[in-house]
Image (spheres, rainbow, N blue to C red):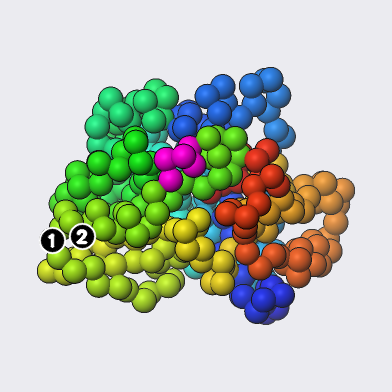
């Protein structure tokens, strides 16, 4: 099997697949209030068969880890069917889901049966008023029910992602910690990132990883023990809270980037291959796919693209090339 090795000797084994750039939420750091397509023109998405074919080719190049994401992936109909198609590919070993969980309670069992083994859920506060304000209309009770459903069907580990903002939810960290410890959730704190107009607009509320960790330590009153399982951690620095089984992680894309271990690329819902969150380079896979290219030709395009993967993002030095990109379209 040919392996995908980028110019900096990083082995690409992980593909994030966005199935839609639509979302039923309008989180302030992710999407403009009017939505990603205020003019009403929605993108032409890849079909499930087209996505499966692209994933198959990636899997033959050594990619074994797939994440279904969006936008909000659960608003696309019959997502479990795509999961089922991907799960039978011989080289795919892991299928995960990123979701806001509002619709997860009704779909968790079908997704688990189709091969989705675990889930990451966005949850920035347990305060229903703040939650509605951050998401611009989200329903906290449905999200909490979705988390419970993920546990009930065994879609574990359940990871909860909290984007920390200084004047919005920084003071909610203790309550989120207590909830995560009680539930057995892996809680991950994420720094705001200057991607798109929405992301740039909240950078004034940026909280560094070190400030977050100080807040955590002050609340738990215990040491944070670093964990070295990078397969589980991904881009997060992960810690176990001394005296418990609870794990917390911090994703510090701005204050302490993790680019040297990046093993992933992203496929957008419209069939573009994004090589880096913080760089504008995108490779169109949809057009040649629909023009009838062979799998070998598609592999050649992908191999050539990985050969151009940049070394790192430059969130602190240069934002002009990502100000017109929407996080909701990139799949996080």
What residue is drawn where x is 67% and y is 76%?
8
Dividing the image into 4 quarters, which one contains the N terminus?
Answer: bottom right
Relative to 120, is 70 above or below?
above
Position of residue 2 relative to residue 18, above or below, is below
Secondary element at tag 1: loop
Q: Which residue is mark 1?
A: 221
Say few, some or many: other residues with alpha carbon within 10 Å of mark 1 (under 14 / 14 to 19 / 20 or more). Answer: few
Q: Are marks 2 and 1 in contact (CB under 8 Å)?
A: yes
Q: Which mark is residue 159?
A: none
Asked if residue 221 lies left or right of residue 99, the reply is left
Taking 40 as reference, is 275 above or below it?
below
Q: Is residue 114 visible?
A: yes
246 is within the stretch colored magenta: no
The chief SS type of the magenta part is: helix
**Quarter-wise, where is residue 209 in the image?**
bottom left
Task: From the image, tell me which residue sits under label 2.
Answer: 217
């Amino acid at each position: 099997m040919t392996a995908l090795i980028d110019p900096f000797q990083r082995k690409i084994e992980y593909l994030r697949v966005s199935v839609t750039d639509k979302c039923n939420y309008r989180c302030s750091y992710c999407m403009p209030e009017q939505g990603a397509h205020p003019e009403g023109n929605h993108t032409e998405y890849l079909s499930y068969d087209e996505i499966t074919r692209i994933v198959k080719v990636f899997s033959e190049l050594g990619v074994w880890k797939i994440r279904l994401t969006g936008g909000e992936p659960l608003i696309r109909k019959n997502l479990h069917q795509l999961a089922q198609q991907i799960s039978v590919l011989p080289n795919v070993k892991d299928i995960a889901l990123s979701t806001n969980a509002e619709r997860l309670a009704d779909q968790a069992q079908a997704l688990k049966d189709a091969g989705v083994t675990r889930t990451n859920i966005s949850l920035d506060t347990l305060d229903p008023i703040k939650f509605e304000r951050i998401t611009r209309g989200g329903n906290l009770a449905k999200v909490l029910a979705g988390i419970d459903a993920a546990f009930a069907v065994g879609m574990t580990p359940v990871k909860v992602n909290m984007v920390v903002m200084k004047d919005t939810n920084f003071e909610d960290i203790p309550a989120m910690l207590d909830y995560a410890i009680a539930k057995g959730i892996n809680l991950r704190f994420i720094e705001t990132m200057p991607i798109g107009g929405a992301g740039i607009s909240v950078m004034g509320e940026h909280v560094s990883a070190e400030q977050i960790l100080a807040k955590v330590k002050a609340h738990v009153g215990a040491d944070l023990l670093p964990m070295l399982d990078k397969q589980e951690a991904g881009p997060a620095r992960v810690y176990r809270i001394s005296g418990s089984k609870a794990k917390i992680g911090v994703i510090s894309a701005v204050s302490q980037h993790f680019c040297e271990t990046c093993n992933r690329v992203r496929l957008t819902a419209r069939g573009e291959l994004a090589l880096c969150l913080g760089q504008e380079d995108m490779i169109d896979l949809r057009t040649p796919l629909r023009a009838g290219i062979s799998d070998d030709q598609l592999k050649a395009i992908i191999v050539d693209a990985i050969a151009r993967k940049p070394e790192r993002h430059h969130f602190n030095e240069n934002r002009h090339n990502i100000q017109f990109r929407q996080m909701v379209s990139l799949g996080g």
